[in-house]
Image (cartoon, rainbow, N blue to C red):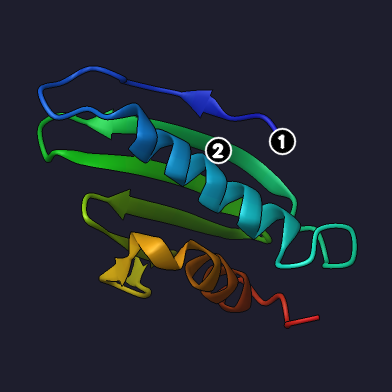
Amino acid sequence: MNIEYGNREGKYFTEWRLDLLKELLGKVHQGPMPGTSKVVNIDHALIWYDAEQDYHMLFFRALGHEVVVRLYKAFSSKIDGEDHWVGCPRSQVWEYANSLRRKLGVTPD
């Protein structure tokens, strides 16, 4: 899975937030049980820091959908322009990845 990186500069940029978005993307891709879960093919992934809005951002396409995830103190996302789970604590990265997989049409294994 190729990940493109955009802006990585700004007053409140932190590398760990980009790493957390990369981890989230990996969990969406591999599922809760890597090796036994259905793999979600990611067509295009971009991670960047939006210095103007002070959000660390993830964009990807998968299964015919476009997903945008914002991270500050919590995750929020839009799938095809519609709000998904807004305000998920960053400590619940597995639950968030699984909710994205379900919304993309991947049933639990």
The N terminus is located in which quarter? top right
Q: Quadrant of residue 34?
A: bottom right
Query: What residue is at 21 percent from the left and 55 percent from the top?
Result: 73
Q: Quadrant of residue 83?
A: bottom left
The C terminus is located in which quarter? bottom right
State the residue position of label 2: 45
Q: How many marks?
A: 2
Classify residue 82 as left or right of residue 45: left
Q: How many angstroms separate mark 2 from mark 1 (CA)? A: 8 Å
Classify residue 105 as left or right of residue 24: right
Q: Quick check: marks 2 and 1 in contact, CB under 8 Å?
A: yes
Tag on residue 1? 1
Query: What residue is at 53 percent from the left and 25 percent from the top?
Result: 4
Residue 61 position, x and y percent, is 58, 50
Residue 101 position, x and y percent, is 62, 70
Neighbourhood count class around disc 1 (C-alpha, 10 Å): few under 14, some 14–19, many 20 upward: few
Sequence-first tag of 2 and 1: 1
Classify residue 5 as left or right of residue 34: left
Query: What residue is at 40 percent from the left and 53 percent from the top?
Result: 68
- Mark 2 residue type: Ala
In this rendering, is residue 98 above or below 25? below
Residue 45 position, x and y percent, is 55, 38
